Image (spheres, grey):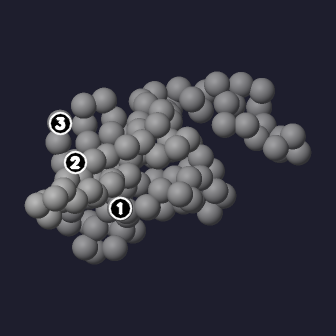
Amino acid sequence: MPFPSSTIIHPNFEDKLTRLFRQTAAVQQSTDTTDEYGDITQSWTAVSGLSAVAAQVARVGGSSKRYLPEFIQEVATHQVTFPEAYAQITPKMRIVVGSNTYEIMYIHVDSQSATTSCYVRETST
């Protein structure tokens, strides 16, 4: 996560920041294919540049849900945060961390474009 040379930061800041994002996530998008009988098969592939990104996964609860739209508050189980702004992530994608798969419900890029938070619903373990 390189910073512009004009940015003043502590020399160890990037090292300390990577300690917060200890997990590796893959952001995936689906492709639907139709066979000769009209049956649709959905397959998932990693989004280019997002197949192994640093992430932090946390359960969502209590006050952290307060700022989410009401319908998202009801279904979001986790928050997956990335240490960069990823504008290409959409709610039609999913996030895989280890053996856990998360459906993206809501995406927030912070005002400094420094992090991307995805509020997700766990779909499998």
Q: Amino acid at mark 3?
A: Thr
In the image, which is nearer the foreground, mark 3 or mark 1?
A: 1
Q: Residues within 10 Å of mark 2 (few under 14, many from 20)?
A: some
Q: Residue at x 47, y 56 (%)?
A: 89
Q: Which residue is mark 2?
A: 122
In this orientation, which residue lies closer to the viewer: 106 or 37? Answer: 37
- Going from N to C along the chain, the mark reached first, 2 or 1, is 1
- Is residue 111 at all visible to an observer of this figure? yes
**Residue 74 found in image quarter:** bottom left
Q: Which residue is mark 1?
A: 92
Q: Are marks 2 and 1 in contact (CB under 8 Å)?
A: no
Q: Are marks 3 and 2 in contact (CB under 8 Å)?
A: yes
For this orientation, the residue located farthest to the right is 6
In the rendered view, tell whether residue 39 sits above or below residue 19: below
For this orientation, the residue located farthest to the front is 36
Q: CA distance from mark 3 to mark 1?
A: 20 Å
Q: CA distance from mark 2 to mark 1?
A: 14 Å
Q: Which residue is mark 3?
A: 125
